[in-house]
Amino acid sequence: MKNHRSTAVHRGAFSARQRWVAAGTLACAPILGLVAPTAGAIALEGFEAPALPANTHTYTPTGAAWNFSGTTGRGIQRNGSPFHAASAPEGQQTVFLKGHDAWISKSVFLPAGVYKVSFMAARRAAPSGTNPVQVWVNNRRVGAPIAPASTAFARHSSVSIPITTSGTYTIALSSTRQGDHTTFIDAVSIDSPNPFDSLYAADFQLKPLGREPAPVVAKPLTKATSLSVASYIDPVFGTRVYRATAASDYPGSAYVRHEYSRRQAFNADNSRYLAQSMDGHWLLYNADTFQVLPKSGTAGAFKGMVGDCEPIWHPTDPKKLWYTGRNGSLVWYEKNVETDTDTVLVDFTARLRAIWPATTSVWTGGEGTSSADGRYFAFMATHYNEATQTKTIDGLFTWDRVNDKIIGTYDASKFGGVYPDHISISPSGKYAVPSWAYTPKLGTRAYTLDFSSFRQLNTQSEHSDLALGPAGEDYYVVADQAAEQVRAINMANGNAFNLMPLYPRSGSAYALHISGQAFNKPGWVLVSTYGDSANYGKVFPDSTMEPMYRKLMLVELKPGGKQHAVAHTRAAERYQYLSANEGTAYFGEHQATLSRDGSRLLFATNFNDQGPPSSYMIGLPSWVYVGTTGSGGGSSTPTPTPGGGPLAIVLGQVTHSGYSATFKLSSSVAAQCRWSSQAGSSYGAMYDNLSRSADGLSHSKTTTFATTGSQTAYVRCKADASGEEKELVVRID
């Protein structure tokens, strides 16, 4: 939910291996596509299924996410197996390929673009000798075989693979050497070529969340000029940070920064990004040199684009974006960003005036985007009364860009004429998702495209974004104040799980923004936090550094998934930007946004000086999304994480001395617990927190009563992952 400007500009696989064609390498050859069953490129799963007993292995496993085929040895081994492989870099299991004809394969959807296949690999210690691995795509070789020379796992990547047609492709890895030679493989991924891969050490990994202090870093006085020289290296997390905007980029502006967490700033190939001046002019930047690319509008800005004109990048053509008039109009345009020329994308005037005669604007309310493939949109049809300075909602509708067809309409009378905060389409294009900020009976809903049915996602319209899950699911990821959690809610079935608590301990809190814009890296969102406090808002900022404070974090969309710290935001109590012109702290919020492939992010900060913010870019190597340690996986012992399964609570030691009492309990899965003296209350109604161990399984409370007599306490625990609640009665004699 965005604030609004106070100035003139309103913000509103194959089961049995086929014989492969021994064609030439695929370094440059285009690949013919098949029909696409899902949306978004997929980060390939590891090899943890089927789960094997410790110290064992199995040949040609069933129930795996990959297909196993060929005539020589192939299968899965677990740490400690007779193969004596190094510990798996991701989870506990790896593939083994033995001999000259062992294969694994998997089908994956890829949008048009340029990719590479990457994986962790190691050779067996004995018998000695490497067994090179050949990468294949749709029966064609990709480059030369890759030979892992070490018994320690290292990351390897194929040559570039141009995909000219979006569709489903079969990715395969095969062994190539005759004899008893074995290669181990783990953490396979498909990534776009990434310039940051050569700028980081090969063993660089993101860290799990922790309570590290944020050392002072001098504020960069000028912008970066190339990727090779970062403005600074985050002293705790080692990430490369580049100052990407400056107020001087637009004459007379107090600041220039990217727009918002829910708005994609980077184009399809990450060569360009957008930023906006204080008075609403839009600038185009070279994403490798950080220089403004002058256009034909005012002072080198884009012509025709001003204020909240909702620029949406084309998903595959880096030269194109779509936009409308400020706060919406009946016409949407397609702009060639290199030539600054416009053509009409769609004119809704005749069609919508036939339905809602007063309509003057078609827009999303400043927070929507297209489906991941750029085909489907969800819009609000609105009009504005200049005399009364009021906005009126006429209705909602969905539109198919490819067929230029309005799919469904929903008259405002059917939802009481309440003006939504915003609307967007889900990444798959299956659901229209309007949000009503202050009307709980409406809240946030996922409608089918014809508006014939909906699923209630939330009773509020809180900071959130729509994102693709690891298997292409549509998720609504939200800072849910009622649940006191950042939650991910599956739009198809309503299943939900918690990602992290909003109140780390009693009386503490923080604010955040969420970006689910990495459509080509499904299963991840970016979270940026700010405004932390303690003692129920009386102490600001919180003097105790909690793991999620003042950070940029990559969060995996699965129960107990990985949570990686990317960088500190370099701002605490004076992150806010206050001026006579603005009168709001809004533009000092970090509002980090993630590129489609997850390799770049932008966030705003003023380095804690309460001055105007600038945008900073962080570049990440392609391998950080797979094979890393920390919450939910890794080669080291992982930090305990919220587990699945039913919640059970077991009472432990109870002590009572005078007015004071202490009781301890344990939960079967990671949970948060509260207590009160009243039975039957929900977790949210309980008034006092129990402390819990780092893994969320052990809980304790020491409290003081008004009398020394026997007491009864009622404890209610809420599972971190599932949200399931259970109550326990504690008798204190």
Image (spheres, grey):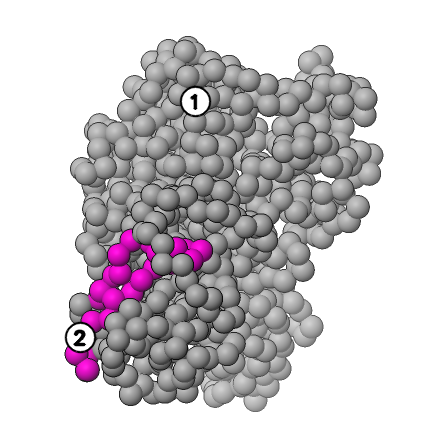
**Foreground pick, 376 / 670:** 376
Q: Secondary structure at mark 2?
A: loop
Q: Could you tell which of marks 2 and 1 lies nearer the N-terminus?
A: 2
Label 2: which residue?
A: 129
Residue 559 vertical position relative to residue 343 in the rendered view, above or below: below
In the displayed structure image, the side of residue 344 where residue 180 appears, left or right: left
User: Badge 1 is on which residue?
Assistant: 337
* Image spot of residue 555 (x, y percent): 43, 56
Q: Label 1 crowding class (10 Å Cα cut-off): few <14, some 14-19, many 20+?
A: some
Image x and y of residue 436, in percent: 67, 40
The one of 728 and 60 positioned closer to us in this rendering:
60
Near-viewer residue (536 or 325): 325
Give the residues in magenta: 125-148
Q: Residue at x 58, y 50 (%)?
A: 35
Residue type, label 1 = Val
Query: What residue lies at 22% left-to-right and 60% top-to-bottom?
Result: 203
Disc 1 is placed on an element classified as loop
Q: CA distance from mark 2 to mark 1?
A: 53 Å
| Residue beneath the point at 49% across and 60% down | 107
197 lies left or right of 695: left
Which x, y percent locates residue 464? 54, 46
Q: Nearer the viewer, mark 2 or mark 1?
A: 2
Number of numbered discs visible in the structure rendering: 2
Q: Position of residue 312 (x, y in %)?
A: 51, 31
Question: Relative to the observer, which residue lies in front, 169 or 336?
Answer: 169
Q: Is residue 36 above or below residue 400?
A: below
Residue 119 magenta-highlighted: no
Q: Is residue 681 left or right of residue 613?
A: right
Query: Against 394, is 183 above or below?
Result: below
Q: Residue at x 50, y 33 (%)?
A: 314
